[in-house]
Amino acid sequence: MFKKLLGFTLLSIFATFAMADEAGVKKAVEAAYPKFKVESVTKTPYAGLYEVFMGGQIIYTDEKLTFLIAEGRLVDPKTKKDITGERLEELTKIDFSSLPLNQAIKVVKGNGSRKLVVFSDVDCPYCKRLEQNELSNISDVTVYTFLYPIEQLHPDAANKSKSIWCASNRVKAWEDWIMNNQLPKTTGNCEVPLEKVGELARKFGITSTPTLIFSDGRRMLGAQPYKEIERALVAATTKK
């Protein structure tokens, strides 16, 4: 979305502004792009670059806003660290304790001591792959699954989500569907939190499924290998 509105891949040239601090850069960027809210501006230790977090991504500029670098990655040549990636992880962290877990399907594996949230679309093939091939190899975790149908891609996902949520045993209904492609034969009427989950996803900029959120607030996109998920679970627990 941001790329389309900016209309460039790496650089855009602007008039020079005599500003030399974060507040000045923030004001200049907001004036140039009034449709976007600038979440933060931070001066980096690299060649006078300023990090600007807006529209769910990081862009870079100088103190005079003579250029913008969009969709690029800032990498430390000495350590080979992806500075942009690390900063995005930090800036998009979610307060895990604020998540309305009563609106999710709760599945306990092993002792359930670790916590993991997954935003999942019932008709998303990658979501099924995540459950079948990756999460099935992880134990001692409580998984909270928010049913998040993306109707533009899967028109029947909302109906299936309602059927699963309103089943007499929604945990079993979820597992039957995700593992065996079987929906409940009978289902009751109940209040389904799909709209609330949609609002929650929009609030946190979640646009794809599956999206995983760990207890330290960090997120992971896609059906990543279970070893990567396990590593993130360990890291989240250690940080506590």
Image (cartoon, grey):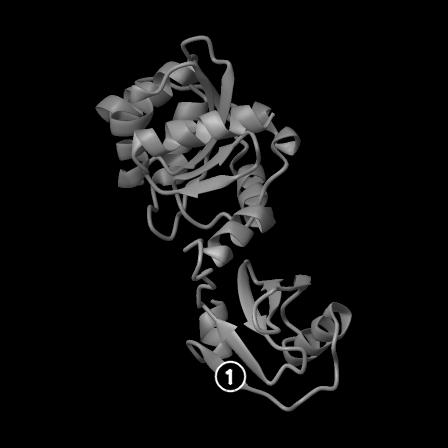
Label 1 is placed on what type of residue? Ser
Identify residue for label 1. 12
Residue 220 in the figure: left or right of residue 66: left
Q: Position of residue 240 (x, y in %)?
A: 61, 25
Q: Which of the pair 83/219 is nearer the observer?
A: 83
Q: Residues within 10 Å of mark 1 (few under 14, many from 20)?
A: some
In screen coordinates, is 205 left or right of 34?
Answer: left
Location of residue 48 in the rendering, given as x and y in whole percent from the top left corner:
62, 73
Q: Residue furthest front?
A: 78
User: Toward which corner of the image does residue 124 lie, by quadrant?
Assistant: top left
Q: Which residue sits furthest bottom?
A: 15
Residue found at x 45% / y 71%: 3
Coordinates of residue 229 in the picture (x, y in percent): 38, 31
Instruction: Report whether residue 215 is seen.
Output: yes
Task: Identify the residue shown where x is 63% and y is 81%.
Answer: 65
Q: Residue reaching furthest left?
A: 180
Looking at the rendering, which quadrant does residue 163 occupy? top left
Residue at image coords 50%, 58%: 84
**Nearest the eye: 192 or 139:** 139
Instruction: Classify residue 125 as left or right of residue 52.
Output: left
The answer to whether residue 184 is seen in the rendering is no
Q: What count of labels does the image hold?
A: 1
SS class, disc 1 = strand
- Residue with the most extreme top position: 111
| x and y, in percent, of residue 27 in the image | 74, 74
Whether 24 is drawn above or below 51: the answer is below
